[in-house]
Amino acid sequence: MLTIPTQDYRRSSYRVPTRPLTGLDAFVNGFVGKHHRRAKILETLRLDAEKIVAQEREWTALSNAELQTRLREFREHFRRGGKKAEDFVVPALAAIREAADRQLGLRPFPVQLMGALALHRGYLAEMATGEGKTLTAGLAAVLAGWTKQPCHVITVNDYLVQRDAEWLESFYHFCGVRVGFVALWMGTPERVKNYGCDVTYVTSKELLADFLRDRLHLGKMQNPTRRLIRRMLAPDLTVQDGMVLRGLHTAIVDEADSVLIDEAVTPLIISASHENATLRTAAVLAQEMIGVLQPGVDYQSNPRYKEIEMTKAGLQKMVEQAAQLPGLWQGHDRRLELVIQALIAREFFHRNQQYIIEGDKLVIVDEFTGRPMPQRSWREGLHQAIEAKENIPVSNPAETIARLSFQRFFRCFHKMSGMSGTAREAAGELWQIYGLPVITIPPNKPCVRQQWPDRFFTDEKAKWSAIADEVVKVHATGRPILVGTRSVKTSERLGQELLERGLTAKILNANRLSEEAELITLAGERGRIIIATNMAGRGTDIKLGRDVPALGGLHVIATEWHESGRVDRQLFGRAARQGDPGSAQSFMSAEDELIHKYLSQPVQKILLKAWQKSLPGKQKMARRAFKIAQNKAQKMALKQRRSILRSDVWLDEALSFAGGDTI
Amino acid sequence: MDKTFSESWYRVANQKICLRPVVKVRRQNFRGERWFVLENPFSNQYFRIHPATYEFVARLRPDRTVEQVWQECLERFPDAAPSQEAVIQLLSQLYFSNLLQYDLAADSAQLFDRYKKRKQREISFRFLNIMFMRFPLLDPDRFLVRTMPVAKKLIGSFGALLWILVVGFGLKIVAENFSGLRVEGEGILATNNLFLLYIGTVIIKALHEFGHAYFCRRFGGEVHVMGVMLMIFTPMPFVDATSSWSFRERWKRVLVGAAGMIVELFFAAIAAFIWAKTAPGIVHSLAYNIMFVASVSTLVFNLNPLMRFDGYYILSDLLEIPNLNQRASAQWRHLFERYLFGVKSSETPANTRREAGWLTVFGFAAGIYRTIVFSSILLIIADRFLIIGIVMALVCLISWAVVPVVQFVKYLSASPRLERVRPRAVMVTAGLAVLLIILLGIVPFPHTFRAPGVVMSSQRMQMASETEGQFDKVLAQPGAWVKQGEPLVQLSNPRLALQIINTRAHLAEVNARLLQATDGETPDVAPLVRLRDSVADTLQKLTVDDEHLTVRARQAGIWVLPGVEDYFGRWLPRGSDLGLLVNPQAFEFTATVMEADAHALFAQKIHNVRVQLYGDAATKLSVSDWRVVPGGQSVLPSAALGWSAGGEVPVNMDENSQGHKSAEPFFEVRGVLAGTNHPELLDGRSGKITFQLPAEPLLPRWTRSLWQLLQKRYQI
């Protein structure tokens, strides 16, 4: 296939991110970010949206063919780019709006136009659940697709990727934009074809993995000039065949807070397993060795930091046993590392919580989503230690070939914008790291959700039975109920409780995406009870059944507060969408992980005492304690993300002699 | 503890890298431990590694991957081999030190970025060390190499012998002329000598730096940087002899460090010789100044290990603790973190107990010493230069006090090292701060202030001869108590006796003539009567004079006549000094209290006042009563108190004041001294009066002195 040099050049082009600012620079930059988020911006968006709406008449009068002709004209302007294209944004959006109406039967609301404008101008638009974010993204993606620069619309899972791309296909087609999507199951030719489209729907994981694979494929030929010279000297040895992407330029990120913040730290790793027999035998032997160690006597474990500290007695016992280890592991430091890893596996990793055993294979379970992650493995040594603990064949460690965190990857786009239901809390971070100013788009209709008072309990047991009772009570009125849980285990526990009370609930674990999405759409039907982990059914609206609004709409129960307040808000946002009625309530207990992990022992004790003695103001105090714990958790997470970014940048600089991975 | 495996390993695993071919490797022994020093002669950069690490580095070859080398190390040294994390750390450090060779084209943007950052760091470092700014100017290496044949002869046994001879000879001269040296030494900081002192310092310091340079070059180290350092705004030469750090033998490193002082002492001896052999003049003075700088300042500053001069590096080499200063700070941080903050994972930077001890002691001493030096530099600068002085002092204050405090607060609030013990760390720090505030702001400390003055007797009488005569004998014992009218000295005056006889005869004659005249004419009588009266008058006077030959005490008291033996046989004209009569019960100490201290005299109750005399530190005289002479004075009670006579009160230097007029007004305080056993020693002696004020906390006292200083200097 003939490729022109610029095309090849773009294939490996991405924005080289500037180094994160520190000190005074970061401080000043924070003010710049505030300036970008000032109220005036929203006002201009609103005025522009009004202008678009005002042009409605002009466009409804046109026939389909005429509209398409005009759309093609706009496309040419955007293709040429430059300042002039900006003048056409308002009429172009008016035309696209008309196209949406004709193709999808949906005429975008002014708030959706505001959202589309915000996306086009590089903002992170905060829009409440159910405000039609998919269509909003579609409007902006048409503008981006017209430029013919690669535009990626990024969503959280493969189901949504396919659903959105297919739903909007006719609309895109009408506007003269080729659309495609990439999902896990696709092979290389299919990927090439879809990435070749003007607009591509894809998950962040697939995109990053493809990006890394492309880079691996290029090897030492990262530099386009090098490739060009190579092609001139040796035309047969082209490396660009087999690449799937055509470069990174524009990204429109849906659920931006979860993609850019919550999951941003975990790096995507491309790995291959390699034979390492010594590690395998050592892991098994270490597991035998720690059999003699007593917790508290031979070692201390610290659950907050997931750390093990050996006592002198424990170290002594290890010395006695060292002889049976293979040579490499006999030395003090290596041995200690091995033993501690085995102890960590014993103390902090539990079956059916962090992992499950499928056949004789260890499968990691995402703690939050409850989703099994067969591709993932823990870091070298730990995975083996857990396998040894579970008495299943110890696998070879996976050797990393390429690795990149989402945090860094998303800094490589020339133009990025995003949408989210909850981003305000993270506005500072989103600006500092990604240069994304957050702007809150008001809802189309005011939200009438009732927030029922929080309920607190001293122990888990009381809490769960109270939740079950509450479900029974609300169910009796016929209202649909959605219960959000943190893990699969708690979902199942609640299901059990309900069963004892004669109710059956559907449990969603984010395992079978399309099926669950379907269930979620039905969650608004009368009398439904759905228990879902936080991630389950994301991106799917819960539409209320016919007579449900009259009963009071959907009721959402949070069984526990999450470490991040945003996740809680997302759950509550499921009720009372688009002006519908609805209510939400949280249940918390002093035994919740949030309290356990982030409040100091004395504070926990005081809280518990106050509660047991029913002191006045205990309600307020408990709420306050949870707030403090949540703040602490968020701060810690932020700090961790910062330090990971910093160490990533440092590593890049320090290892730039190795080249290759530099971003 | 490093993890054996690293998640970033893949980035280096397949790299084929090695040390640059120019990198030199040397072996060093430190505290019986073997180390390897990697040196890049192009950039003068050094890197010290452990043997186990060296085993890895040495195996790196352009035809083998890092992974292969690491595997080999693991097989050979299962326990000592560096972990993957350590390898990555090591490679990055080698890369930053420009010691690595790799086949990829260097990321020039990044290199440039690094260069820019280094420059920026240098500039900010220069401003933070504004008192010791360095400006590299030239590369003396070729000059050194060319002149080495001459220098070579001097650096060796011949040179050592010569040095011992010259310095020995110089010492001899100094010993012989010690008193002269001391006298001249008193004027070393006088204003008219400062220029010469500076010239002498520059000459000797240039020689000093060349000493370092030649010794370093002699042992094979390259010396590429020479320049000017602005030490407290005074340009001084400096040379960069860091290449000596890679010398394998310890004594060579020590010798290079000591070379400056060796050279200085040599020239000090020569200057001593010149000084001794020349008459006062410019050469004489210059030689003196050189001698002073080269010996005293060298021993006080250069040899002092607490400042970061030669002594520091010598000590560092002798103890075999490199980076003594940094590691002492690290040791102190460790002590704080481990024992006060309770950071269990904190590890001492010391390898042995002895080293830990050294680091602790050094850190403590250096910390205190540096605080003193820095605060005195601050005061001197603020004192000497007006507005600029304040600005400079502010800059110094920021870099020496504010920046460290801000850094500490940052460390306390955000350091990941304190992650788990932050509440305790904050509590301990707050506790210490409160303790300090209590100590300074609340706990009262004894408070005294001192003023110079002289002892004077309030009832003193100068004895003088009232008639002329020869000093014949002493009738009373000098130094003893005499009653009023008691004879003290017998003078003799033969002429006076003759005059009396003569006058008596004359009177008899006049009387006879008068008798005769009464028989005759009346008009002759009147003149004779007048003559008789006149002669009788003369006789009367002479008789009184005769009586005055026996000098009597005019009041009771102690008769003080210093050097009585010199008087015998001397002819004393009328009015000659015959000592003092003093009343030991009535001594007064007249002190000059400068205005800055005067507030204490008026504002506070004074408990206890005592006087201490110079040269008699053991006895403290108590003062029974004291008063302030109203109004500011400007004439000193004794010239001995003024600068011109070696006292401490600044005086006007113009001629007619004769060292009596003080430069600024003062308050005169008179205190009545209680009796003493040696009254004759007291009068006119100078000493200090100590006023004991009520105990007061230090902080208000300090703020008050600061305000007073500002007020005085800048009339704020």
Image (cartoon, coloured by chain):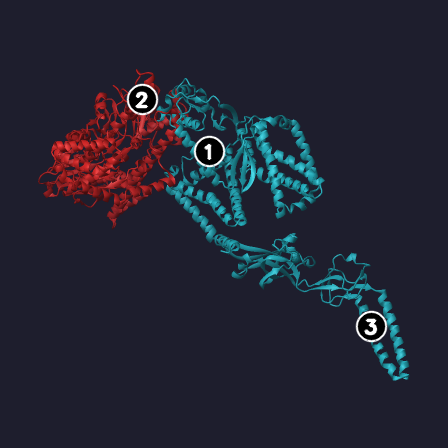
User: Which is more foreground, mark 3 or mark 1?
Assistant: 3
In this rendering, does residue B591 appear at all? yes
Res A179 → quadrant: top left
For label 3, the residue is: B538
Question: Tag 3, which secondary structure?
Answer: helix
Mark 3 and mark 1: Cα distance apart in space: 102 Å
For label 2, the residue is: A218
Disc on the earlier residue, 3 or 1: 1
Instruction: Bin the neighbour count of mark 3 within 10 Å (Cα to Cα): few under 14, some 14-19, many 20 and up.
Output: some
User: Is there a contact, CB below 8 Å, between mark 3 and mark 1?
Assistant: no
Report the front residue among A625 and A257: A257
- Name the amino acid type tagged 3: Thr
Report the front residue among A499 and A12: A12
Question: Tag 1, which secondary structure?
Answer: loop
Tell me the red chain: A
Compared across the picture, whether A452 is left or right of B10 comes to left
Tell me the cyan chain: B
Judge if badges 3 and 1 mark residues of a common chain: yes
Subunit bearing disc 2: A
For label 1, the residue is: B349
Subunit bearing disc 3: B
| Residue B482 point in image, percent of width and height | 73, 64
Mark 3 and mark 2: Cα distance apart in space: 137 Å
Instruction: Bin the neighbour count of mark 1 within 10 Å (Cα to Cα): few under 14, some 14-19, many 20 and up.
Output: some
Subunit bearing disc 1: B
